[in-house]
Amino acid sequence: MYIKVLAIVASVLFSVAAMPGFASGASGPSGVSGASGPTATATQSKKPTGAYLYVLGVAQDAGYPQAGCYQPHCMPGWQDPLLRRGATSIALVDPAAKAKYLFEATPNLPAQLYDLEVQAPSAETPLAGIFLTHAHMGHYGGLMFLGHEAMGARSMPVYAMPRMQDYLSTNGPWSQLVAYNNIVLRPLQHNVAVSLSRNIAPRKIAPNNITSNDNKSKVTVTPFLVPHRDEFSETVGYLIAGANKSALFIPDINKWSIWETDIAEIIQTVDYALLDATFFGDGELPGRDMSKVPHPLVTETMEALAGLSAEHRNKLWFIHMNHTNPLLDASSEEAALVRAAGFNVAVEGTRLPL
Ligand SMILES: [Zn+2]
Ligand SMILES: [Zn+2]
């Protein structure tokens, strides 16, 4: 079922590579910024002109601290609101196309939308759509804020796979979003790229200054199926390819060995990989054999990629951390270990130029 992912994803990449300005295998995370990024101060003051990804949330579905958890690892989060973390979400901002997109609609959507507004104001880059990976609460639950009782959105495009679309249109309360046209479902297909170029009506932004009616987006978004607990929907990851760089976004996946794509191989074809880091390693869930937990442990991912060059290892950004995962604390021993091995831990505000 997943056998063709690598080949087809690679072919999409080749077509992107043919575009002018594509620097395949560009060295290191140049231009990358974030609270822990090496060039944060150098790039954050400049207003980006090219498309980029922006990290809005890094925790597992339930966020940090987790409801009802008063163990020592969650207590700092209850006591200090600044330590709280929203569920995993990234934004794609495309200034040339005057558009921005969300990947995932999390239960923390109100605050994440505000963070995105500060970074990329809607007056210049209005929200043009939301891409969903699957029907687990942290990934789509925030759609409720688009509804009648909250934002009352008008025809917001929501990109979803066939089972996910069916689930949203036939089950309340989500079906009301469809019935009231708060959202418009846009179909996705496994391994079929969506171009984000679109015709937008000419818009007067200042006297005598009318914007062009076709956006200049060079960005494509390609969903691909990944193995996960698929009770209500299938689960996808995304390949997001810009004019110069591309990123994998796989917030939830079963063990790498169950996916028929070789993670160590595919990482070499992209510039960034934001990957499932739900659990760090052994002993994290008392009484559970962590090798049987249906996620790749961070320790397993580091082991699988240990043979890659420093340049390739540096593409990896761990994301989607459970409330038990010590990577949520940048000052933890485990976070230092990950950085020392040449990998990155995603934090809110990380910016990855495409
Ligand atoms: Zn999740
Ligand atoms: Zn999930």
Image (cartoon, helix red, strand yellow):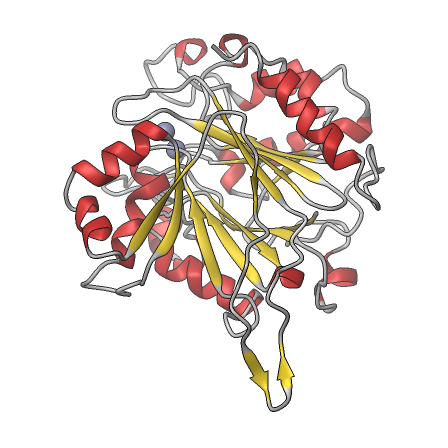
Does residue 244 sit above or below 205 in this rendering? above
One can see residue 314 in this view: no
Please tell me in which quarter of the rendered image ligand 2 is found: top left
Along the line of sight, the residue nearer the viewer: 251 or 325: 251
Image position of 306 (left or right of 85)? right
Q: In this view, does 309 lie to the left or right of 196?
A: right
> Considering depth in this image, is 259 or 275 the residue closer to the camera?
259
Going 59% across and 52% down the picture, which residue do you hit?
Answer: 197
Is residue 167 something that shows in the picture?
yes
Image quarter for residue 192? top right
Q: Quadrant of residue 147?
A: bottom left
Residue 51 location (% of width, % of height): 67, 54
Q: In this view, does 241 lie to the left or right of 177?
A: right
Residue at the image position 40 percent from the left and 9 percent from the top: 292
Asked whether 339 or 105 is in front, the reply is: 105
Q: Residue furthest bottom?
A: 207
Q: Which residue is drawn at 26% across and 33% down?
A: 166
Give whichever of 318, 217 is nearer the camera. Answer: 217
Q: How many labels does the image show?
A: 0
Q: Position of residue 148 (x, y in %)?
A: 19, 62
Task: Say above or below: 319 vs 114.
Answer: above
Which residue is at 40% across, 16% downward? Answer: 294
Q: Position of residue 283 (x, y in %)?
A: 43, 18
